[in-house]
Image (cartoon, rainbow, N blue to C red):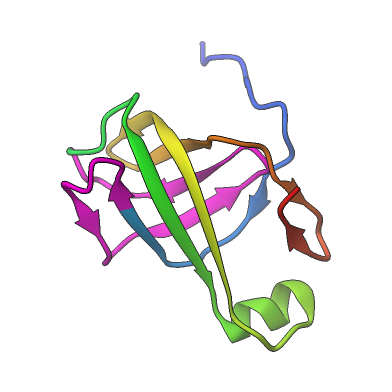
Amino acid sequence: MYGVEKRQQERYSLRAPVQLRKEDGSVRITDGFLTKDISSKGVCIESNDPSLLPGEKVHLEVTLTIDKLRELFDCSEKIILKVDGSVVRSKNEGVAIEFDRKYSIFPEILRAN
């Protein structure tokens, strides 16, 4: 039997590049990370990086390209979502990061509270 779904926030499918830095600055990872989905409380990133461990504080930069913005928000500008969070799960297929604060996400627009 599989575990019970614990998510309380609606998740949106989003494939966008991510830059990640550990809070202590020791590791900066800039290539090969893509988001799988995002919610107002966190993001799931495709990664098999063994150095990202649960409990570690990280800083993320999610870049939404012009094409992605047109697809999601009918917009032609670039947005970089900069957030801090903690690794809550790390497995072969990805890393789950919980944001340090909650953000509002709407299907039409992304904006910080």
87 lies left or right of 44: left
Badge count = 0
Residue 54 vs residue 102: left or right? left
**Residue at left 60%, top 85%?**
66
Q: Is residue 26 one of those drawn in magenta?
A: yes
Residue found at the very far top of the displayed protein: 1
Which residue occupies the foreground of this view, 30 or 3? 30
Task: Give the percent coordinates (x, y) of residue 92.
Answer: 27, 38
In the displayed structure, would residue 16 be above or below residue 5?
below
- Residue 65, x across and y down, in percent: 55, 80
Image coordinates of residue 11 in percent, x first then y, are: 68, 44
User: Looking at the image, which residue is at 31% across and 33% down?
Assistant: 91
Front-lying residue, 74 or 99: 99
What percent of the width, then of the height, locates residue 79? 60, 74
Extent of the magenta region: 21-50
Residue 42 within the magenta-colored segment of the rendering: yes
Q: Residue at x 71, y 83 (%)?
A: 70
Above or below, comparing residue 104 to residue 62 in the picture:
above
* Res 20 quadrant in image: bottom left
